[in-house]
Amino acid sequence: MYDPTVPVPDRDSAPYWGALAQGRFEIQHCLDCGRWSWPPRPICSKCQGDNLEWRAPSGKGEVHSWVRLHRPVFPALKDLVPFKIVAVRLDEEADILIPGRLLGDPDIKQGTRVRAVPVKKTDEVGELLWELDE
């Protein structure tokens, strides 16, 4: 049965989802220019080089923006609402925003400090959650 809460990896994103399933938060890092790259792709978003590796950033950053969902978009989400989806600016790379669901329903504002929480969904796919970094 289709579960809309489980992402479907593609060629470029499979290592990202797989790392989350194993409890690791990793994104691409360019060995040529040193930039962290998001979303996953075959070339660096800055220098267009293809010398990329998967690396673990600190997993910490700040909330740039968010949306609070009050109604489930899919029946599979009915037990989660209300919840917030946040776009997080990582400490390592100010030019990228990484989305994920915020654990709990705390009051937040732009600049709220958060940390990554990888959670296994299946053997091949994980989910990136964020929690307050207190």
Image: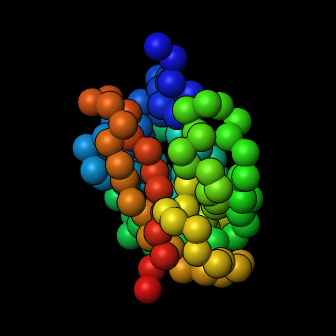
Q: Residue at x 69, y 70 (%)?
A: 64
- State left or right for residue 87 relative to residue 8: right
- Residue 77: image x %, image y %? 58, 39
Q: Nearer the viewer, residue 70 or 12?
A: 70
Q: Residue at x 36, y 37 (%)?
A: 121
The residue most toward the front is 79
Q: Nearer the viewer, residue 46 or 61?
A: 61
- State left or right for residue 31 relative to residue 68: left
Residue 55 at least partly seen: no
Q: Quadrant of the C terminus?
A: bottom left
Q: Residue at x 58, y 68 (%)?
A: 105
Corner quadrant of residue 113: bottom right
- Residue 130: image x %, image y %? 49, 63
Corner quadrant of residue 123: top left
- Residue 124: image x %, image y %? 32, 29
Q: Residue at x 73, y 45 (%)?
A: 71
- Residue 36: image x %, image y %? 51, 57
Q: Is residue 46 above or below residue 64?
A: above
